[in-house]
Amino acid sequence: SGCIPRKKFINSANIYNTIKNAGQYGLPVCHAGTPDLGKVMDHVRSVIDSITQYENAQAYQKLGIDVYIGKNHFVSKNILSVNGIELFSKYFIICTGSSAMVPPIEGLKEIPYLTNKNFWDQATLPKKTLILGAGPIGIELGQALRRLGSDVYIAMRSDKILQKEDPAIAEEMKKILQGDGVHFLDNSTVLGFKRQNSQIIVRYVRNGSEQELVVDAVVVATGRKPNIEDLLLENAGVA
């Protein structure tokens, strides 16, 4: 659900975009047809499956690495309990990954929103997509969806994207995305969501004016939070 599927998805979108714009490169203009998102996702999953055979418990055990699977928590800074088995070590490296941070917006939990975890379960391309957040994940998925044919809107509180990156590069990236046809709802605050049959009504305020947008899918990309629940890090002296 992380970097690898996202990069393969972007790669498929970029290839499709290049085919559509072959004339720009002095090549014969091609009719690329309409992409089948289900087949694109099948390709993404096949790549993940090919990697999984080298990244599983059995593969690591063959390398001489002990693998313990189960619920775990710290007993102290030098003891980790895994399903009741206490493991002693001078050092522990915590690599538990992260999950999508879901903002407390009215109605969001009542709609079938997407995150990087379930994004890959889609079988059909949404006609219109709203992305919450203008960080790397939101920008990458937004451009890829747009290049595959979805009408993409990115909601953001300011008028800047990729705020942790170099401002000049971020501004140039925004121009490229706008050239692709991505719509930026900058300086906006999303107020709530409501189901309307198979579609979703989005209420938001932009520059002091309350507006509505009807979309087919909502992607939450407003940040990440560490997967450290139930680890009892305080027992290890980690604040």
Image: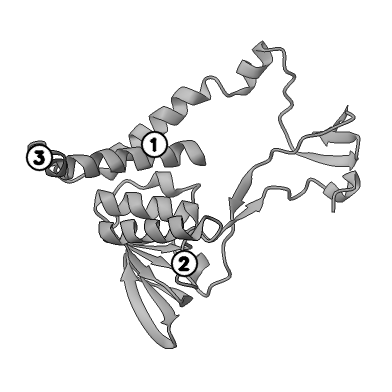
Contact, mark 1 vs mark 2 (Cβ under 8 Å): no
Q: Residue furthest front?
A: 168
The residue lying toward the viewer, choosing from 239 and 103, is: 239
Q: Which residue is mark 2?
A: 160
- Give the quarter of the image for residue 171: bottom left
- Looking at the image, residue 2 sits to the left or right of residue 230; the answer is left
Of badges 1 and 2, the one in the foreground is: 2
Of badges 2 and 3, the one in the foreground is: 2
Q: How many marks?
A: 3
The residue lying toward the viewer, choosing from 195 and 45, is: 45
Q: Amino acid at mark 1?
A: Lys
- Looking at the image, residue 53 sits to the left or right of residue 125; the answer is right
Lower sequence index among marks 1 and 3 = 1
The tag on residue 58 is: none
Q: Amino acid at mark 2?
A: Lys
Q: Residue furthest left?
A: 28
Residue drawn at x 30%, y 56% as measured from the top left: 126
Residue drawn at x 7%, y 37% as measured from the top left: 28
Q: Amino acid at mark 3?
A: Cys
Residue drawn at x 65%, y 11% as measured from the top left: 62
Label 1: which secondary element: helix
The tag on residue 8 is: 1
- Give the quarter of the image for residue 68: top right
Q: Residue furthest bottom?
A: 208
Lower sequence index among marks 1 and 2 = 1
Tell me if residue 169 comes above or below residue 49 in the rendering.
below
Q: CA distance from mark 2 to mark 3?
A: 35 Å
The tag on residue 30 is: 3
